[in-house]
Image (spheres, rainbow, N blue to C red):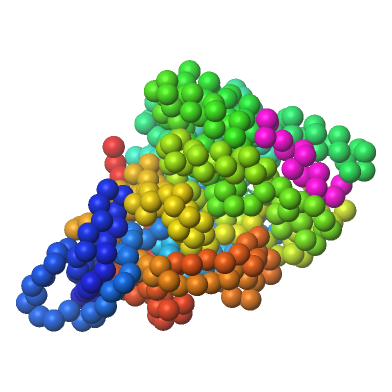
Amino acid sequence: MELLIKKGCIVNTDSTQQADVLCKDGKITAIGKDLEFDSKPDNIIDAGGCFLLPGGIDPHVHMHLPTHAGYSSDDFISGSKAALYGGTTTIIDFVTPQKGQSLAKAIELRKSEAKNCLTDFSFHVSPVEWRDSLKDEIKDCISLEGLRSFKVYMAYKDSIGLNDEALFKVMEVVGKSGGMLTVHCELGDEIDALRNQFASKNKLSPKFHPLSRPAELEAYAVKKAIDLAKKAQCSIYIVHVSAKKSLKFIQEAQENGQAVLAETCPQYLLLNDAYYKGEFEKTAAFVMSPPLRKKKDQKALWNGIDDKTIETIGTDHCAFNSAQKRMGENDFRKIPNGAGGVEHRLPLLYTYGVSKTKISLNRFVALTSTNAAKIFGLFPTKGTIAIGSDADILVWDPKIKNTISINNHHQNSDANIYEGMKTKGGPKMVIKNGTVVIENGQLIKNPEKGHFLKTNPF
Ligand code: URP
Ligand code: ZN
């Protein structure tokens, strides 16, 4: 099966060129101005007026996440379909074992839950407790399972969060094994104390959610993670950075040559804590951790993108229906945390980043695709338009307009935190593994199931 994409402008992180792209059997096989063929390709696309971008890679999604309010509302099929509509062709989700369960068993189960995923997919693996066997389990994840990224939580101490001692031990092992440790930085004990303090005073509405998770408690967690990782000689990647104060510690560490990488998400760039004012039905959708911050934090995050303190943008996609959010109607602590966004990441960043000249188009590609591929061992199979790479390509039309709404989104939820936001620029076509799967906003062909991606060997 051959596909020829003609007249597009190819944008990679370090180059922009007008050239045709030939794809064969899921791979990019030729790039050039006057490509020659033995026989006419099966499918020829005219991409005139459009950019050709590498398919988006979302390094932070939670599909089918078990919570006290039931599973998050997107499973791997609905969530990955939403991802494709928005130009994301690869997602990295999480393996979160039960306590006492081996990492290998948890990986096996999670792979089976993800088996019908429509995008390609990989995982970060979460040690949720310390045990001595983890030394070998983590090494086996890397050498046998092909998974070299791990995730620890400093919050959620009553379930999956690690204490400092366990965190340090995990860092030592991941560091020695050459893996990457992604870290959810919020000081769990202090947050739990604040949550309970508010509850004891009958302060139970969603507006107390952000007040119980202040920016300082994110920033001090970031500082602690950086200090522990330095001692443990472990590379860390701080997920969903939301606070200006956190950036200061990350910048300092980076200037000192420490391997500290940072991710933020569109919600922290584009929304702020004004959304917590009002009645439950309007505010519960915005309950996520970390919470939305202040305008000054948004500004600092854009600066952090500009000066490269932040190198990736994920979504932390974790959708819920309002009925699920309503579990916390009388107590904000019971509202399941999270919101969807996997479909909107690229159009939002293009509209509010590229078009507003906050970031260049090449930087957009780096932030939404290439950097995640490089950091998580998927490059150059993913994250670039180059000969030999997977043919995951977006035919990006800068003129496509949309108003984000629950009436036209594809995530499985009756809420959308971006409701009413306008975007200009989006994928006219989404090509996954050499096949057009989305055309003019329609899923034209049920895509083949996605592939589980092992990360590159060291
Ligand atoms: O509120 C959030 N972010 N929910 C998903 C789980 C997590 O903390 O990443
Ligand atoms: Zn998350």
Q: Is residue 237 left or right of residue 360?
A: right
Q: Is residue 315 left or right of residue 379?
A: right
User: Residue 212 in magenta?
Assistant: yes
Q: Residue at x 51, y 56 (%)?
A: 352
The location of residue 189, given as percent across then percent down, is 73, 30
User: Which quadrant of the structure image shows residue 414?
Assistant: bottom right
Q: Nearer the viewer, residue 453 or 271?
A: 271
Q: Residue at x 61, y 64 (%)?
A: 421
Residue closest to the far top: 231
Residue 154's place in the image compared with 279, above or below, is: above
Q: Nearer the viewer, residue 187 or 409?
A: 409
- Residue 15 seen in the figure: yes
Q: Nearer the viewer, residue 322 or 4?
A: 4
Q: Give the number of callouts.
A: 0
The magenta stretch is 204-217
User: Residue 198 in magenta?
Assistant: no
The location of residue 176, given as percent across then percent down, is 39, 26
- Quadrant holding the N terminus: bottom left
Q: Residue at x 40, y 34 (%)?
A: 179
The location of residue 256, given as percent across then percent down, is 42, 20
Q: Residue at x 62, y 62 (%)?
A: 418
The location of residue 404, given as percent across then percent down, is 59, 68
Residue 444's place in the image compared with 145, above or below, is: below
